Amino acid sequence: MAYLINFIAEMTFCHSQDLLVQLEQRARELDVPASYEGIVGESALSLPLNMLIFCRRSAASLSWSGNPIASNTYPHQHHRHVLIVALKGSGLVWIDSRGFMLEPGQAILVSPYQKHSYTDITSSKITWLFVTFEHSRCELMDNLRSRPASPLSDQALRSLGDLLAAWRTDQRDSSNILLLALLLRWIGREVPLRRRALATRHGSAISALVGKINRIAFEHRNRAVSIEEVSAKVGMSPSHLRATFRKATGQSLGNHLRDFRLQYACSLLADKSRRLAGIAETCGYESQFTFSRAFSKAYGCSPRAYRARLVEGTVARAPSTRPDAD
């Protein structure tokens, strides 16, 4: 809380007169309450947890860069929320096969287990801020899910500046969480609430289904997961699940489940100390040969060649997105 206390003290002593004038004006604008019982707010404020802030300064540093639909490069996914703020440089952020343009002064949220990647970055030098965190499900997070990039208001920009200053002062300061919660609230105010129409509820249900499938695939990415297994967990028949998933994402469910294991293998290949046979076993392949064949079919190169490209700083091709049978 040290930064928050110092910030309040600075505002009080350096700008006290201006603040008093503003506060007096706002106080006089308040209505006389019809009742003195108070207004009921949220019984428990939902706060983000386990926050991490970092900056990407070049297009090359966006390691998972590309649109899987266009067969460019391989997307990424994980269990945390990712708030991306563009401060310099523009580009497309692909979230679950949908492309959203991100311009300087805008922010976009990637929800847990959503596949995301980047393409069409306008400059080799960028300044994109990443804030990753965990958060329980709530109306604010649901409302920001799969939304186009939102312009940051003056209040949001000030909150972001306060958050960065506090983070640099002390990353373990609990006020960081409060400042992030405030920033998310300001961003949420710029996004209209989702309409409660039947079509929107249907879209939310589809989004929740895809999220559940992604969570199952992520949790079992070290082995092959069958469509029958997934369908049993989500309570749908395999045929209906295949058709629903393809309609929602434009991809076959079989390829989608395969992608999670391959992405896990890619992350392990980045560790040069790991042997290929060990990676194949960790990812649930019967043998190194089976692993290499699946990897080469998806990426157009062997795991060994892919590792060499990682060392060189180049990016491998994405898995094919042809409409294969599941």
Image: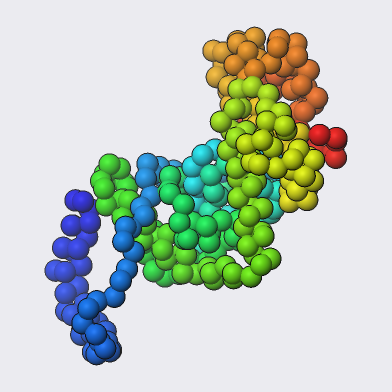
98 lies left or right of 22 = right
Does residue 7 lie above or below 137 as drawn?
below
> Residue 40 occupies which quadrant of the picture?
bottom left
Which of 123/76 is in front?
76
Where does the image place residue 29, in percent across and percent down from the top left? 28, 89
Where does the image place residue 284, in percent across and percent down from the top left? 65, 17
> Residue 304 occupies which quadrant of the picture?
top right
Which of 1/118 is in front?
1
74 lies left or right of 240 = left
Which of 247/316 is in front?
247
Does residue 126 lie above or below 308 as drawn?
below
* Residue shown at the point (22%, 78%) measured from the top left: 37
* Residue shown at the point (46%, 52%) measured from the top left: 137
The answer to whether residue 93 is visible is no
Q: Quadrant of the C terminus?
A: top right
Does residue 208 lie above or below 271 as drawn?
below
Where does the image place residue 279, in percent across and percent down from the top left? 61, 15
* Residue shown at the point (36%, 55%) measured from the top left: 46
Where does the image place residue 302, in percent across and percent down from the top left? 75, 19
Please state the total of marks drawn on the protein image: 0
Which of 287/302 is in front?
287
The answer to whether residue 173 is visible is yes
